[in-house]
Amino acid sequence: MPNSRRTFLKTAALTTASSLAIPQIVKAKPIKVSQLKKPLAIAMWDYSWILRHHRYGEFEDWDRALEGLAERGYNAIRMDAMPQFVAADTNNELEQEFRAIKDGWKPACWGNDYTMTFRPRDALCEFLPKCKKYGIKVGLASWFLVHGTGRKDIFMEKGGLQRAWLETLEFLRSHDLLDNVIYVDLLNEYPNWHGYDWLKNELNKRSDVEKFKLNNPDANVPDMEMGKEAGNLLKQQFYNEFANTTISAVKKKYPDLDVFLSLDSAMKLDRIDLTNFDALDYHVWFHHRGDIPGLGDISKRDQTELDYRQVNRTIKEYWKNNKKSLVDWMHGRIAAISNTARKNNIVCGNTEGWGPIWWFDHPELDWEWVKESAEICVDMALDFDNYKFICTSNFTHPQFKGLWEQKKWHRQITNRITNGQNL
């Protein structure tokens, strides 16, 4: 065989062997919630997933909890990624472990029921792959709360929220943990219900418009102040600019992720500029109708003064006598959410709802109204094809045993969601 031919065959063989031995690896891009074909049955696991991960905690065994969730038909969770603890402090120092102090012995619905320690970085590295293992998609969120840790700096830092998320997402990307993430909710129920104190302080500064103008002569203040009922235009301008600027900054570095801030029905839809939002997660409950007697008492979790037998009876009687008007009100809210999302060319959903905001296991309370209101609202949401992630309640955690143990009910309602069909 001529030398030139032997050289050619040898080179070709080596090239072929090399290409077979070292295949080109293409990392999967995250599945965006905006691209879903069918709705997800999503459970709000908030910060309970980590703050109850300890001996005696309902999330002690993550495999067991996730397997139980999948068994009940859920295929997604909304969870607090704890960016305020994953990120370095203002002095650029990392802290690996935090101690969450439980203040008092009133039962905690969410979060830790005992003083405990947690390691957020280690926890994410262990927990997120388990979610993927059990077929559970992940919506990353943050309530940005202190959780009794005593940490102060990042909550008062001007750019604390944005920096926390960028550092957290970089940490997750460096560990290949973003491929099962369907969205990032930068701040819970914006602009009201969260622990980002810097933002709250800035909004409070704008409560008195005339005083703000005097103290900030160079600020861009709207010429016309809206009436009290319509809301403070100065505040509205500030939180809309903050939201869209923060979303834009995160999306610039992570274009493969859907990014937004969640809202609740205390915030009127027409006050939020959704320009940069990739989805609308708008939380709504019958509780927000404001006229159901007894619901305010539930949130007190008072074991000495309240007769929960009477509270339970009062709520059930009111529900029975006013169901039509309550359901009509809710249908209007759900339709408005869908229409607002459609106008902005984004999908919508609800990770918190539908009956009460607060409920808990108590010998004198039952879960029947929680379940019935969920069944009604889920079916209404399914009437709108842009509802792509739907919860069944705020209570789809193993610590709410009275509801968690009703596997048949969970499977029936999640089957309706994931099949995209109501009854």
Image (spheres, rainbow, N blue to C red):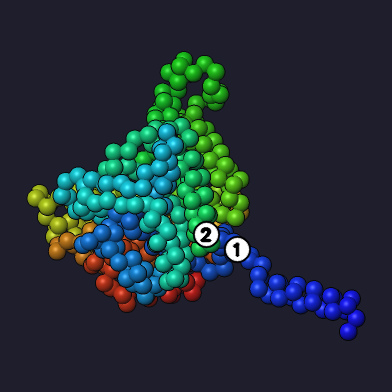
For label 1, the crowd category at 10 Å Cα-Cα, with few meaning under 14, some 14 to 19 and many 20 or more, is few
Q: Is mark 2 on a helix, strand or loop?
A: loop
Q: Horizontal and vertical percent for residue 153?
A: 37, 34
Q: Is residue 55 above or below residue 159?
A: below
The one nearer the camera, 138 or 346, is 138
Q: Say if 401 sits above or below 118 in the image.
A: below
Q: Position of residue 172 (x, y in %)?
A: 49, 54
- Is any part of residue 172 visible from this angle? yes
Mark 2 sits on what residue? 176
Task: Tell me if I can see residue 84 in this picture.
Answer: no
In the rendered image, which quarter contains the C terminus? bottom left
At x 23%, y 67%, the residue is: 402
List the residue tagged with mark 1. 27
Give the number of callouts. 2
Horizontal side, residue 251 vs residue 140: left or right: right
Front residue of 390/5: it is 5
Q: Horizontal and vertical percent for residue 76?
A: 44, 65
**Is there a contact, CB below 8 Å, between mark 1 and mark 2?**
yes
Could you tell me which quadrant the N terminus lies in? bottom right
On the picture, is 30 further left or further right than 123?
Answer: right
